[in-house]
Amino acid sequence: MSKIKPSKGAPYARILGVGGYRPTRVVPNEVILETIDSSDEWIRSRSGIETRHWASPEETVAAMSVEASGKAIADAGIDAEQIGAVVVSTVSHFSQTPAVATEIADRLGTNKAAAFDISAGCAGFGYGLTLAKGMIVEGSAEYVLVIGVERLSDLTDLEDRATAFLFGDGAGAVVVGPSQEPAIGPTVWGSEGDKAETIKQTVPWDRFRIGDLSELPLDSAGNVKFPAITQEGQAVFRWAVFEMAKVAQQALDAAGISPDDLDVFIPHQANVRIIDSMVKTLKLPEHVTVARDIRTTGNTSAASIPLAMERLLATGEAKSGDTALVIGFGAGLVYAATVVTLP
Ligand SMILES: CC(C)(COP(=O)(O)OP(=O)(O)OC[C@H]1O[C@@H](n2cnc3c(N)ncnc32)[C@H](O)[C@@H]1OP(=O)(O)O)[C@@H](O)C(=O)NCCC(=O)NCCS
């Protein structure tokens, strides 16, 4: 017989507030065309992207996160001091340690909230949301801040035709807190490490130790290239189109939601053709609002779902209380899908 008292959490969890931050600089396709042989028409028709935002040196991972989080906290109507944990999903924070989450927790004025980073690529928001829900129901935090933030412009090889146009920078944040009714469904998630080679960093950091610069990729000026994200576009595209629609369907089934019950679909913003294909495969009815934030935001990895959520609510295309299917997928390969009630 265990001597440990049962923990006292909330019966359920829900997203209470959302906030986003997009860097000031808007980068149109014309800028991308300065370094790759392509066209505005090709980029728009093959990816859906028209513009993206690139961060300035001052728009750091921490700074963008603090901006987005401040809005999410205000939207939730709580004080920063009430936050018990800060979970930051990112692959573009360049200090190995400490986690950027601790700096963000401090700058926001939380009362020494637990804080840590997670690395789950473009599924990072769903992974963070799942952890937050667990903490709230289990009772280790009343309110959890989940942040997806990236400066992917730092990890983009502007001479790589396959990726130069894809990525953008930004931060999205949500406050998750207690609920008297289910408002975050079961998460359908997983990983397929056998496909790890399809999206990866060109060169691991340890190759940059002094004396080990041989055989590293060079740019057109002959300088060693900084590591970047590289991908096998077609392989990832096929996987996303065929496998992720199934995962999205499983998340609907797990939540007991039919496509007719759904108000909003917020998939990871990787390619507008992937989004359109999923809408078709899932047979989503006309009334379902579909996030296509990629057009002006590009692919911001872990930030893409909360940024798209914030924009749909800000423009009135979605409203508080709507039932939304969210699905993230990317490097790992990893994925996470769940149905949520919008804040
Ligand atoms: C990257 C992506 C937009 C490329 O689109 P695609 O239709 O698959 O393009 P392909 O790589 O098959 O190339 C098609 C043709 O366009 C050409 N091409 C490739 N990049 C180009 C570019 N930037 N501009 C112009 N032409 C280009 C290719 O050379 C090829 O020409 P060919 O038919 O003469 O050989 C697409 O594969 C994609 O979105 N993949 C998944 C992205 C993703 O989800 N990533 C991350 C998950 S988080």
Image (cartoon, rainbow, N blue to C red):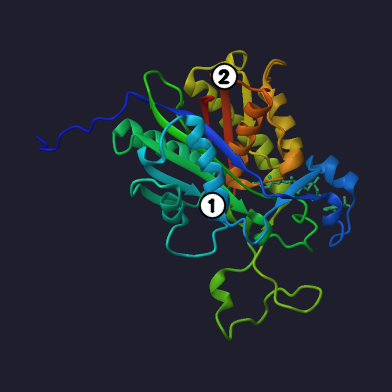
Residue displayed at 62% across by 27% down: 313
Asked whether the viewer can see residue 191, the reply is no
Where residue 328 appears, as percent x and y from the top left, is 58, 39
* Secondary-structure class at tag 1: loop
- Above or below, 192 against 159 in this view is above
Taking depth in this image into account, of 22 and 133 the one nearest to the observer is 22
In this view of the protein, which residue sits in the foreground, 172 or 127? Answer: 172
Q: Which mark identifies residue 90?
A: 1
Residue placed furthest toward the top? 260
Residue in the foreground of this view, choosing between 50 and 236:
50
Question: Relative to residue 131, is residue 292 drawn left or right?
Answer: right
Q: Earlier in the sequence, mark 1 or mark 2?
A: 1
Name the image quarter holding residue 45. Answer: top right
Q: Is residue 131 visible?
A: yes
Residue type marked 2: Asp
Q: Residue 180: horizontal and vertical position, in percent?
A: 37, 19
Identify the disc placed on residue 322. 2
- Tag on residue 80? none
In the rendered structure, the answer to whether residue 163 lies left or right of residue 8 reads: right
